[in-house]
Image (spheres, rainbow, N blue to C red):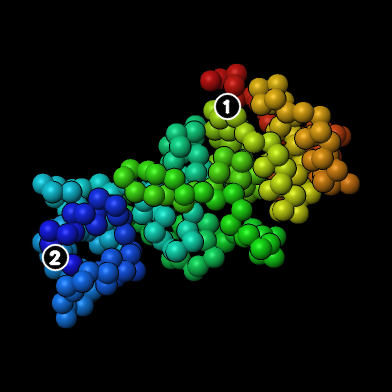
Amino acid sequence: MATQRLSGFAAAHPVFSHEDFREAYERQPDRSHRTVDSLLRQHAQAGSILRVRRGIYAAVPPGASPSTFQVDPFLVASKLAADAAVAYHAALQLRGKSYSVWHRITVVTRAAVRPLTFQGSEFSAVRPPRALAKLPDHEAGIVSEPHAGGIVRATTFERTLVDVLDAPALGGGWEEIWRSLEMIEYFDLDAILSYTRALRSAVTAARVGFFLEQHRDTLSVEDRHLAELSRLAPRQPSYLERRREPGRLVKAWNLVVPQRVLDRAWAEVA
């Protein structure tokens, strides 16, 4: 790929994989005998691209220095694997809906991805919930959207709500989850129900139902939504916390909920 063509490629691929570059290079009618790897090395030596990790690169804008240029971390996250999608707390932060700003970014992917630390951000990968493996569309609730001049794959607000309640440690704990989700004004509640059913977890269904019941007025939650989640909830009392933090039994959901979550005690000191 000629040097003058890199700017056109970079405009559409501010962060790109080796495969992205190879495909673009092979479409050039006048490609030379030079290999893709040698071209990438030449561009890196010229300071027009920055190596993020093996197989992942970032385009350096004209006039910027590779040593100081800050690469958008969400664009990096989306390139960690072909199916990588920004998820959990990071999906909220991507869209400006996280209560706290983290420098830890989680992606969901079927690939084996080694942890990465780059420019102060820590990237890690988790596998999709096991129940999704048997679904024809195991990527339910993942969308591609423009971000920072590129495209980011991320979980929708609806899937993210269920995911952080299913795995609260990846959402930052109950206070961070509650405060973050309360920043979102609208959810497609039927999509939440559909994804919750797909996970086939009674405790997760109860957590989702409990959260929606607490916010039924602000989110326009209908009785039918709560009734379906109630049918999915556990038949025997279960703890909101896996570590079994004491609390009060909320009979509608068969959940033992810590008093601080019931009362949203953190709001008192906001």
Q: CA distance from mark 2 to mark 1?
A: 47 Å
Name, please, the residue furthest toward the right.
235
Q: Give percent across and percent down for residue 80.
A: 41, 61
Q: Position of residue 249 (x, y in %)?
A: 83, 35
Residue on which the image places disc 2: 2
Dot 2 falls on a residue whose secondary structure is: loop
Give the left or right position of residue 106, taking residue 204 as reference: left
Considering the numbered disc 1 on the image, is that residue within a helix, a strand or a loop?
loop
Question: Residue 177 or 225: which is nearer the viewer?
Answer: 225
Residue 21 on image: x %, y %: 28, 66
Tell me which corner region of the image, top left, top right, bottom left or bottom right, holds residue 208.
Answer: top right
Discs 2, 1 touching: Cβ within 8 Å: no
Q: Which residue is mark 1?
A: 185
Where does the image place residue 231, in percent across and percent down from the top left? Answer: 86, 43
Give the left or right position of residue 90, taking residue 189 as reference: left
Closer to the chain start, of discs 2 and 1, is 2
Tell which of 241 and 76 is nearer to you: 76
Report which quarter residue 192 is drawn in: top right
